[in-house]
Image (spheres, grey):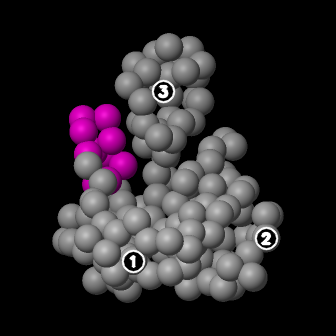
Amino acid sequence: MSERFFPDTMPSPTADAITLPFWEHAAKHQLVVQRCTACGHTRLPPMPICSECRSDGADWQEVSGRGEIYTFTTVHRPIAANQPLPTIIAVIALEGSGGLRMISNIVDANPDDLEIGKPVEVVWEDMSDDLAIPRFKLAS
């Protein structure tokens, strides 16, 4: 198990038929994005049809887990019991994803050290044996 960044009182994400492959890869610490098999357009979050060509064919492409801070905010009031503060919520521009951005948290960082454009890398928060959530930390 990896380090826990959030308390057990935070709700876990739910999977459906469209998002289940994302969570199955995440449980193996693989960050993936959905890719249209007809036109190659990548998408995140996963969707049943491609927004570019309207095809319903898709597969999964692993990305490096590296990126940069696109934007962020620092939360100073808890939304769940025992939530560590401050909590940093960020939009991460994912490297090698065709321009995709992902909302997640930046962990193990002082908010004063964050800037738009700073490089980050994925770290995994293992919630259970079959659920891992991608978080990000400043790249070393």
Quarter occupied by the C terminus:
bottom right
Residue 104: x and y, percent? 52, 60
Which tag, 1 or 2, sits closer to the chain's start? 1
Q: Could you tell me the amino acid type at mark 1?
A: Gln
* Few, some or many residues within 10 Å of mark 2 (<14, 14–19, 20+): few
Q: Could you tell me the amino acid type at mark 2?
A: Glu
The residue located at (59%, 30%) in the rendering is 41
Image position of 24 (left or right of 100) = left
**Rounded to the nearest whole Å, what is the CA distance between mark 1 and mark 3?**
40 Å
Residue that protrudes farthest toward the front in the picture: 77
**Residue interval drawn in magenta:** 15-24
Residue 46: x and y, percent? 43, 37
Quadrant location of residue 74? bottom right
Q: Could you tell me the amino acid type at mark 3?
A: Thr
Decide if residue 122 is in sight here.
Answer: no
Q: Which mark is residue 83?
A: 1
Q: Which residue is mark 3?
A: 37
Quadrant location of residue 132? bottom left
124 and 63: which is toward the camera? 124
* Few, some or many residues within 10 Å of mark 1 (<14, 14–19, 20+): some
In the rendered image, the vertical position of residue 58 relative to residue 131, given as above or below: above
Report if residue 21 lies within the magenta region. Answer: yes
Which element is circle 2 on?
loop
Q: Which residue is mark 2?
A: 115
48 and 83: which is toward the camera? 83
Image position of 50 (left or right of 12) = right
Which element is circle 1 on?
loop
**Rounded to the nearest whole Å, what is the CA distance between mark 2 and mark 3?**
36 Å
In the rendered image, the vertical position of residue 32 relative to residue 17, given as above or below: below
